[in-house]
Amino acid sequence: MKRRAFLGGLAALATTVALVGCTDSGASPDPTDAGPAETYQVRVAALPIAETGAIWAALDAGIFADHGIELEILPAQGGAQAIPALVAGDIDFAIGQPMGPFRAALGGEEVRILSNYANSLPSGDDVNSVVASAASGITSWADLSGKTVAVNSLGAAGDLTIRAAVEKDGGDPASIEFVAVAFPDVPAQIEAGTIDAAWAPDPFRGMVVAAGGTDLGGPYQQAVPGLTVLTNFTLQKVIDEQPDMVEAWTAALSDALDYAAGHEDEVRAAIATNLDIPEAAAAGIVLPEFTADLSNAGLEDLVKLAMKFKYFETEPDLDAIVVQ
Amino acid sequence: MSAPAVTPRLLPAAARRRLPRWLDGLLEAVGLPLVLLGVWALSALVAPNNRFPAPWRIAEAFVDTWLGESFVVDVLPSLGRLAAGIVVAILVGVALGLLVGSVRWLREYLEPAFEFLRAVPPPLLVPILTLLLGRGDETKVAVIVAGAMWPVLLNTIEGVRAVDAVQRETATSYQLSAAQRIRFLILPSAAPQILAGVRQSLSIALILMVISEMWLTSSGLGNRILFFQQNFMIPEMWSGIVLLGLVGVALAVLFQLAERWVLGWYRGLKETERA
Amino acid sequence: MKSTKSRRARSALLGAAGVLTLLLVWQASSELGWVNGTYFPPPTEVFAALGRFVLDLNYWRTIGNTLLTWAIGLAIAGVSALVLGTVVGLVPVLRRYTRSTVEFLRPIPSVAIIPLAILLFGLDRDASLVIVVYATFWQIFIQVLYGVADVDPVARDTQRSFGLGTLSRFRYLVLPTALPYIMTGVRLGATVALILTVTAELLIGAPGIGQLLTVRSTAGDYAGVYALVVTAALLALVINLLVRAVERRVLSWHQSVRAEVVL
């Protein structure tokens, strides 16, 4: 009796393990008519966040297939993960925030920014904001002085632009204590009072406001309006070794972003499906400006700001990092 | 065992002992590490690699990063919390283990629940405990205790359960009080097992010290190392790893001294009570 | 004297009662407002989310992924720890010379070497495996070291004077003494391996429970997050029971053999 239970338990475990072998039907490209001669297997690392909706929607619309690309999206936890994965050759491209490539380049890696992916919005509701609890009494950027502010990752665009915003409003950025808190933990921590304010995107900033908090607005708008949120980057090595694939990918992504810019409903539907959230929630998300164009990305201003607040010891060479 | 058979065996041993004992000990301690360091240095010269910088670069980063202001602001407080966490983990683990190990129905009642709680991934504990305890040192120590107490607790339970039945009955027939029984019978008997648990909890405590500083804090040894990690400051990151290893060695040495002291005391106690 | 069967049943019931108490405390803390139910949902909501998960094939595949990583990691760590631990444990010179290196490498937290793992293996299962194997290996290795070294000197001299070969010495002398230590090591290693598998998936994004947890977390699905935590905890429980069953089997053989030797 005991033995049967033991074997039964083992069998159950084995079955679940065997399920791993079943592959997803996933997004297989349509075997359509006039496809290009070459097909490329492309692995891209992208965070499992709303912004990736553009790629999901474009994938469903077959845009990548039209360029001969069989796309596999890997969920990374952040740029800090994506770059070692690029170096390891595990992925071909990554979508991530631009400070990552800068730091990696300064560390000696030959990271290249191929194109933009999404810009924040220069006016109106931005894709992310700084929210504060009612109890903290924070109503302006200057009020953040001497307070505890949470960002998801220290040393990146979030805390940098917040410092700039505080200084612009006449506050003292050096007196702010920045701590790392994952976005999903923000509402609970603000309510408990363990942090005074936090930088957060939807849906988390909405939760804080709904609980009575204040929304200061987007720090990007204060520091570098329309600053790029995510860029598309890779290694020089990949460009050297697989130029055709890089070209196909750049073209495909550009088309995908144009598609996303013009098909907001499809993007929201893709977000709802892929993040498994209700459609109403997907409808409430502020979407960024999807574009592959780097001209308004604000990279030069970002670097200047970083040097001003001593985020880098030496200035990253944008001409070398950004592929012209 | 004739003389000729013994003498040749003695000679090589005598030859080996030409080195004074302290030198022998030193060789043992640094021999292998130096060899590995040499291999690393050689490969750094032959095939320079960004992600595995040369030992001298790491050494440079070590001095720059840790032997300055950071020592007082980050390293010492972290080590303090580590120490506090270990001490509390041992106290809680032994106390709870004594209780649970002695009362059989309590053990059966609590053990599955313990296994359940144990399996909560540490990164999730930090936000939860912060909500309950705030952002101060207490939370970080609590995170360390929450993970490090398990080996001590579980080993204490096993140690208490394994106490010799004959000795137990002797204690009962002599009508020893519970406190006396614990002090003279259970603890000495379970001591080796408890110490094995403490030894394992040291490594876990160090891991949790790092994890406890990943979020909701702006200073600390673990906090700095993770910052270097996320921002591609590779030599600094490696210097942090080296520092963690050194802390681990220090803990191991301290543990050895403590073990010798504790076991010596209890062994002596056991000898006297047997006499 | 109660029969073993009814004792086992009573033990199982008590254990279940313990877990139930835990859930009740959790529910109470939410109802009584000690924690905010929005961000830290009560068991009722969490189990509802769990119910939804159970119907989703992807959920089971995710569990399978975690179990696969766990099993491979434990196997690699276990076998290499057994082999290396035995070799080092039996050769005093090796033991003395590797001591400092072991004490240096052992406590280095796996989380500190995550970038290196990704560097070497990318964002896949293999990177998680590095984290899992690294930590689990040391757990089991130390236990094997102690077990192999803890040989009864009288028995050892007896065996030597009988002139038994190395292999039989290993089988009848070393293995029986070392086995309890090894089994404890495997039991502890099994749990550590699972915790680290989930943690590595959380921090790296390799496929498995930890990764699904992050996705649900980013989507603001707190009930789902805790449903996955419960899943991981249940897995740990099941694994623990299985390993204990194996341990009982292996050691029961061992103890009866030992009993004969002593007589």
Image (spheres, coloured by chain):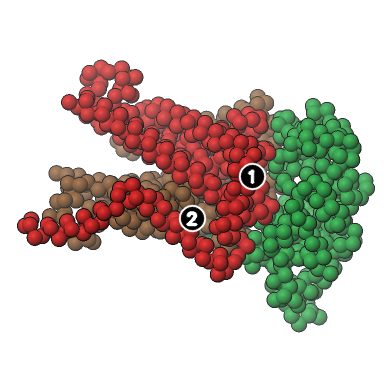
Chain colours: A green, B red, C brown
Image quarter of the C terminus of chain A: bottom right
Where residue C174 appears, as percent x and y from the top left, is: 26, 53
Q: Residue furthest right?
A: A123
B89 displayed left or right of B267: right
A87 w.r.t. B228: above or below? below
Q: Nearer the viewer, residue C71 or B57?
A: B57
Where residue A14 appears, as percent x and y from the top left, is: 48, 58
Question: Which residue is found at the position 54% from the left and 36% from the top?
Answer: B79
Question: Which residue is found at the position 63% from the left and 46% from the top?
Answer: B65
Whether the residues at callouts 2 and 1 have beta carbons within 8 Å, the answer is no
| Disc 1 target residue | B224
Question: Which residue is found at the position 46% from the left and 41% from the top?
Answer: B250
How packed mark 2 is, by other alpha carbons closer than 10 Å (few <14, some 14-19, many 20 or more), is many
A134 displayed left or right of C76: right
How packed mark 1 is, by other alpha carbons closer than 10 Å (few <14, some 14-19, many 20 or more), is many
Q: Are marks 2 and 1 on the same chain?
A: no
Q: Chain of mark 1?
A: B
Where residue C203 appears, as percent x and y from the top left, is: 62, 50
C244 displayed left or right of B243: left
Question: Which residue is found at the position 77% from the left and 36% from the top?
Answer: A176
| Disc 2 target residue | C133
Residue A90 placement: quadrant: bottom right
For residue B157, which numbered disc appears in the image?
none
Q: Nearer the viewer, residue A167 or B274?
A: A167
Q: Mark 2 and mark 1: span between their CA atoms? A: 25 Å
Secondary structure at numbered mark 1: helix
Secondary structure at numbered mark 2: helix
Going by the numbered disc 1, the residue's amino acid type is Arg
Going by the numbered disc 2, the residue's amino acid type is Val
A144 w.r.t. A201: above or below? above
